[in-house]
Image (cartoon, rainbow, N blue to C red):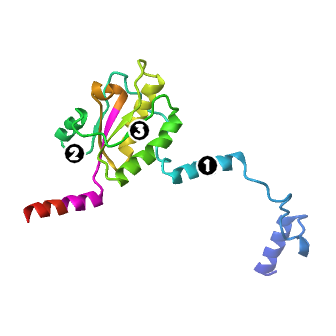
Amino acid sequence: MTQSARSDLDFQALMGDVRPLSRGANRADPGHGRRGPSEAQLARRESAAAEVEGHGFLSDDFVDLVPPFDPLAFRRDGIQQGVVDRLRHGGYADQARLHLLRRPLEECRRALTPFIHEAFAHDLRSVLIVHGRGQAIDSPPNVLRSYLAKWLPQFPEVQAFVSAQPSDGGLGATWVMLRKSERARAANRERQQKRRG
């Protein structure tokens, strides 16, 4: 007996009573007609649509709560402390305000992204976000403050932010300094060249 014949017999012995499908039955039965998307699929689609909308990168997952009497402060590398101090003391005019008082966290999250992007698109440099401050660390206004401290550094347009002075809302408001757009930088260079020339 040849090796090939022995292999065929071994294979047939292993297969036992298995019979090949008939010619017409070589396709799986898909069952009922096409079903609609599941709830999980719909949730994933909604989440993806939110990311396309532009605020999907702002997570509302766990956040370290900022104590209610601690001021917020952040600055990127290269931003001088003098600029931050001037921002803190209201040295720049508020060119736009976003009021988030008594609004649900998800609504605040949805409002923040277009506000920052539109302010940047219109070459605004200093904006004020009014969010409130609760007395307890886990009060809704303080939770929102904590999320703002987490979210604002995620925007490449944000150079710095600090809690406002009492006259501008105190710890219940945050000044945000946006970087200059390329258009604003070009206009600034042009003005400087005209002064020299």
Q: Is residue 59 visible?
A: no
Q: What residue is shown at x 45% (from left), y 28% (from top)?
A: 143
The label shown at residue 176 is: none
* Residue marked by disc 1: 46
**Left or right relative to 4: residue 81:** left
**Left or right relative to 9: residue 145:** left
| Closer to the camera in the image, 94 or 16 | 94
Q: What residue is shown at x 18% (from left), y 43% (from top)?
A: 80
- Residue 181: within the magenta? yes
**Distance Cα–Cα, label 2 vs label 1:** 38 Å
Q: Which residues are magenta?
A: 174-189
Closer to the observer: label 1 or label 3?
Answer: 3
* Residue marked by disc 2: 79
**Distance Cα–Cα, label 1 vs label 3:** 25 Å
Q: What residue is shown at x 30% (from left), y 29% (from top)?
A: 168
Closer to the observer: label 3 or label 2?
Answer: 3
